[in-house]
């Protein structure tokens, strides 16, 4: 890879990232995290926090919507109506 020089390091949560040193084609020097590393870090953090992925736990963590503003409720109603009209739902 002629354009890239990678510096690797570990960050919080056990994620392993690579920082790209100057891509001369794009002028971008951001972090690259592979999807597998990201998902592994998420699984580790969930296990450390005691979060279990079951449908019951997922439903318990969802936003109930009880504190939504009238404006947000109206927007969601319009979205649902439009998706029904389009045959999406």
Image (cartoon, rainbow, N blue to C red):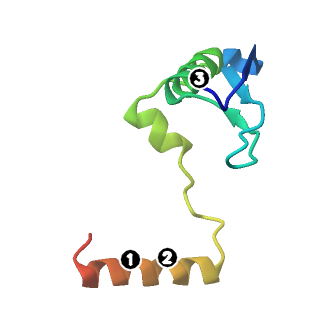
Q: Helix, strand, or loop for circle 3?
A: helix
**How far separated are the C-alphas under marks 1 and 3?**
32 Å
Residue at left 41%, top 35%?
A: 56
Q: Would you name the residue on which mark 2 appears?
A: 76
Q: Would you name the residue on which mark 1 appears?
A: 80
Q: Helix, strand, or loop for circle 2?
A: helix
In the rendered image, the vertical position of residue 67 relative to residue 77, given as above or below: above
Residue 18, image x, y percentages: 69, 24
Residue 52, image x, y percentages: 49, 23
Residue at left 35%, top 83%?
A: 81
Q: Residues at badges 1 and 2 in contact (C-beta under 8 Å)?
A: yes
Q: Looking at the rendering, in which quadrant would you find the C terminus?
A: bottom left
Residue at left 62%, top 82%?
A: 70
Q: Tell me: 21 left or right of 50.
A: right
**How far separated are the C-alphas under marks 3 and 2?**
30 Å
Q: Would you name the residue on which mark 3 appears?
A: 46
Sequence order check: which comes first, mark 3 or mark 2? 3
Sequence order check: which comes first, mark 1 or mark 3? 3
Q: Tell me: 56 left or right of 70.
A: left
Residue 12, image x, y percentages: 76, 20
Q: Looking at the rendering, in which quadrant would you find the N terminus?
A: top right
Instruction: Bin the neighbour count of mark 1 within 10 Å (Cα to Cα): few under 14, some 14-19, many 20 and up.
Output: some
Instruction: Bin the neighbour count of mark 3 within 10 Å (Cα to Cα): few under 14, some 14-19, many 20 and up.
Output: few
Q: Nearer the viewer, residue 26 or 73?
A: 26
């Amino acid at each position: 890879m002629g354009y890239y020089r990678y510096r690797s390091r570990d960050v919080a949560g056990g994620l392993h990232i690579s920082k790209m040193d100057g891509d001369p084609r794009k002028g971008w020097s951001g972090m690259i995290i592979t999807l597998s590393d990201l998902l592994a870090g998420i699984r580790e953090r969930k296990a450390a926090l005691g979060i279990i992925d079951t449908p019951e736990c997922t439903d318990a963590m969802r936003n109930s919507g009880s504190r939504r503003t009238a404006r947000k409720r109206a927007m969601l109603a319009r979205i649902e109506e439009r998706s029904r009209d389009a045959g999406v739902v």
